[in-house]
Image (cartoon, helix red, strand yellow):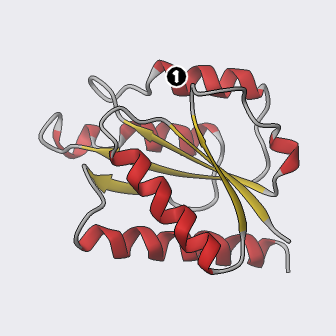
Amino acid sequence: MVSFLIAYATYSGNTQEVAGLIHKTFVNHQVEVKLYRIGCGPVPNLADFDGMIIGSFTWEKGATPDEVKDFVLDVGYKPAHVYVFGTGDTQFGGDALFCKAAAKLAKFYHSTYPPLKIEQSPRGTQEQQVMEWAKGVMAHWLHLHA
């Protein structure tokens, strides 16, 4: 069975909500998945998973939060299959800084699938966007391993 780790950092709960929707979508498609809140407990062994999804909010002026940077350092290597999502707020910096942490993480991990960028909370119309992105991640992973 395919297994994924969803590692995320959250302050306001928005990124956690997105992680929860992704988790629910994966479970509904019989994919084994573990949620891990970055900074809360020992870092899971990524070798135990087929892929990782990492989620972060964008901090200050387009910065990746320190907790996420520490997680990346603690992992110590770049896993082969990393997918990225982020939450942000266009009222702080406009489109240039919107979900900049997600863009930086996707570039760092050489992610071959576009990062998901959510404006604040995934509620409302963005819920469907999250679920479609999660389905796309599953399809992308399966395509790479066909």
| Residue 103 in the figure: left or right of residue 52 | left
* In the rendered image, the vertical position of residue 85 relative to residue 99, given as above or below: below
| Residue 18 in the figure: left or right of residue 25 | left
Residue for point 29% across, 68% down:
126
Residue 115 visible in the current orientation: no
Q: How many marks?
A: 1
Measuring from the top left, give residue 45's x and y in whole percent: 82, 37
| Mark 1 neighbour class, 10 Å CA radius: few under 14, some 14 to 19, many 20 or more | some
* In the rendered image, the vertical position of residue 94 relative to residue 114, given as above or below: above
From the viewer's side, name the closer residue of 43 and 100. Answer: 43
Residue for point 56% across, 76% down:
135
Mark 1 belongs to which amino acid?
Glu
Instruction: Single out the residue that lies furthest toward the front.
Output: 41
Instruction: State the quadrant of the C terminus.
Output: bottom right
Residue for point 37% across, 55% down:
117
Residue 113 visible in the current orientation: yes
| Residue 92 in the figure: left or right of residue 125 | left
Measuring from the top left, give residue 90's x and y in whole percent: 18, 45
Instruction: State the quadrant of the N terminus.
Output: bottom right
From the viewer's side, name the closer residue of 40 and 145. Answer: 40
Measuring from the top left, give residue 89's x and y in whole percent: 21, 43
Instruction: Single out the residue that lies furthest toward the left.
Output: 91
Measuring from the top left, give residue 109's x and y in whole percent: 65, 42
Q: Find numbered disc 1 in the image and state the secondary structure of the residue it sits on.
A: helix
| Residue 38 in the figure: left or right of residue 96 | right
Q: Which residue is denoted by mark 1 in the rendering?
A: 67
